Image (cartoon, rainbow, N blue to C red):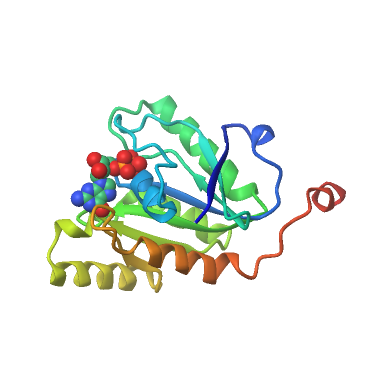
Amino acid sequence: MQVRFIKTAVLSRDWPEVGPAEVAMVGRSNAGKSSLINAMCGTKTAKVSSTPGKTRALNFFDVNGKYRLVDMPGYGYAARSGNELKSWQQMIENYLTTRSSLVGLVLVMDIRRKWTEDEQMILQLLQQISCPLLVAMTKSDKVGGNEKRQRVKDLKTLLGIDGVIAVSNTKRQGSELVEDYLFKSWVQDFQPISPYSEEEE
Ligand code: GDP
């Protein structure tokens, strides 16, 4: 995979022009989102954050000149203040609800954690805009094989979706399945949007 960093942006006027399909990635701070992006890309593209919740903006990456990954800042970090949480929510909601080239969202969560209100909030947002979800359950190396299978199965049942994949970034397991899934299910058939046609509408 050839991955190129495009830009960092908060406000919609600073986002890159619409064009190729965009896959958003979101997760609680420290869930392993940057590690997953790096594992998928085979490079240190997304700097693995040493300070949880450090990044505050959307990071756009081009993948193989075919689609974009949009790395969203982590949520649910205890040190976040009320105001920060609000601006995080606004930025995420603004992107998810207005971006016409958004084809799906990958939610990255530690396989040992429970599905909480934070995840539920994201799910509801996705349902409102009919955006498909894939859950990457990271750190699967931290649990045994049976527990891993059970947790994947339970979440599939809870959410009523097939898109739940166990991932170990340290053991390099599962990241290629995530890439394969999002490409085949969401990206492959997407017709890139011409920025001009959007302005005309
Ligand atoms: P982010 O805040 O979601 O971007 O999380 P990072 O990718 O920075 O990862 C947070 C920490 O979890 C780092 O110390 C990683 O090395 C570790 N980590 C990430 N993925 C895995 C995994 O699959 N297994 C294990 N054991 N550790 C992981």
- What residue appears at the point 44 percent right and 56 percent down from the top-left corner? 106
- What residue appears at the point 27 percent right and 73 percent down from the top-left corner? 153
Residue 73 visible = yes
Q: Residue furthest right?
A: 200
Query: Horizontal and vertical percent for residue 36?
Result: 36, 51
Residue 29 visible = no
Query: Horizontal and vertical percent for residue 66?
Result: 62, 58
Q: Nearer the viewer, residue 78 or 33?
A: 33
Q: Is residue 5 above or below residue 183?
A: above
Q: Nearer the viewer, residue 188 or 172?
A: 172
Query: Horizontal and vertical percent for residue 6?
Result: 59, 39
- Left or right position of 153 against 123: left
- Left or right position of 136 against 9: left
> Number of labelled discs?
0
- Left or right position of 33 against 198: left
Q: Is residue 170 above or below residue 151?
A: above
- Left or right position of 20 against 131: right
- What residue appears at the point 53 percent right and 71 percent down from the top-left corner? 184
Query: Horizontal and vertical percent for residue 140?
Result: 22, 60
- What residue appears at the point 37 percent right and 44 percent down from the top-left corner? 34
Q: Is residue 165 above or below residue 50?
A: below
Report the image quarter containing ligand 1: top left
